[in-house]
């Protein structure tokens, strides 16, 4: 099986590569320093497994997972994240991540995740298990509503969100209104604060 490491920190990629090349299950290890480069490569030659850092300079882990849905041959996915956010973990699971690993965890945990996912099983870091059982206001959002929320949190206008999602402005505006209603927020500042509290707001 080939595995691709998607992380913008070269030293981290080097360390993870050394760990993965020691595994009998792994035939080849590729490296990408951006989500875009990985997606372009996957579109040409489908990758079998991805180990993705949630915090990337171009796309975050959830955005990458959504973009993979539009490409053939969806790989097995392990998401590494330093964010102990229930919202992020739940959405990643919905979008097909088989492994959810705490980035501050040990290298051994990454290897356990790779072995489990290679065998067709799920893997969740122990510190994330309880978080996945918790409920949040964001649980009420549909997939499209969550996408609109993330676009708003990224600074996109409703018009820009409509273009990004390839839907009519009215549809995007309806999604935005439902997000505000379901989350019981009444202004953009309240929405930004909620996004920050749930680890969804990308700090600049």
Image (cartoon, grey):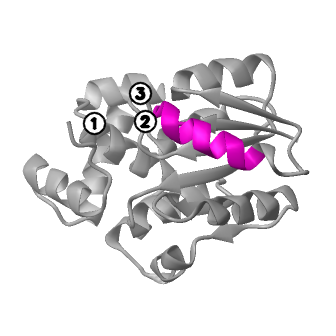
Name the one closer to the observer, 174 or 33: 33
Could you tell me if the residues under marks 2 and 3 are in contact, i.e. CB atoms within 8 Å?
yes
Q: Is residue 88 above or below residue 70?
A: below
The magenta segment is: 7-20
Residue that numbered label 3 is attached to: 58
- Relative to 59, 201 lies left or right: left
Q: Quadrant of the C terminus?
A: top left
Could you tell me if the residues under marks 1 and 3 are in contact, i.e. CB atoms within 8 Å?
no
Q: Is residue 168 visible?
A: no
Tell me residue 84's x, y (percent). 39, 67
Residue that numbered label 1 is attached to: 154
* Rendered residue at 47%/31% (across/down): 8
Give the secondary structure at mark 1.
loop
Residue that numbered label 2 is attached to: 56
Give the secondary structure at mark 2.
loop
Nearer-N-terminus badge (1/3): 3
Q: Residue 160 falls in which quadrant of the image?
A: top left
Q: Residue 21 falls in which quadrant of the image?
A: top right
């Amino acid at each position: 099986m080939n595995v691709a490491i998607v992380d913008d920190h070269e030293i981290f990629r080097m360390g993870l590569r050394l760990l993965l090349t020691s595994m009998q299950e792994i035939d080849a290890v590729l490296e990408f320093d951006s989500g875009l480069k990985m997606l372009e490569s996957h579109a040409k030659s489908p990758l079998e497994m991805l180990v993705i850092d949630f915090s990337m300079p171009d796309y975050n882990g959830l955005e990458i997972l959504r973009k993979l849905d539009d490409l053939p041959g969806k790989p097995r996915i392990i998401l590494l994240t330093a964010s102990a956010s229930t919202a992020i973990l739940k959405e990643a699971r919905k979008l097909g991540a088989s492994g959810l690993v705490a980035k501050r965890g040990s290298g051994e945990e990454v290897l356990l995740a790779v072995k489990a996912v290679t065998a067709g099983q799920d893997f969740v870091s122990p510190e994330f298990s309880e978080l996945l059982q918790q409920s949040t206001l964001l649980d009420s959002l549909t997939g499209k509503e969550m996408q609109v929320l993330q676009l708003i949190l990224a600074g996109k206008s409703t018009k820009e969100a409509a273009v990004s999602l390839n839907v009519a402005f009215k549809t995007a505006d309806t999604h935005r209104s439902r997000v505000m209603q379901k989350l019981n927020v009444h202004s953009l500042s309240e929405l930004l604060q909620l996004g920050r509290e749930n680890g969804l707001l990308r700090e600049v």
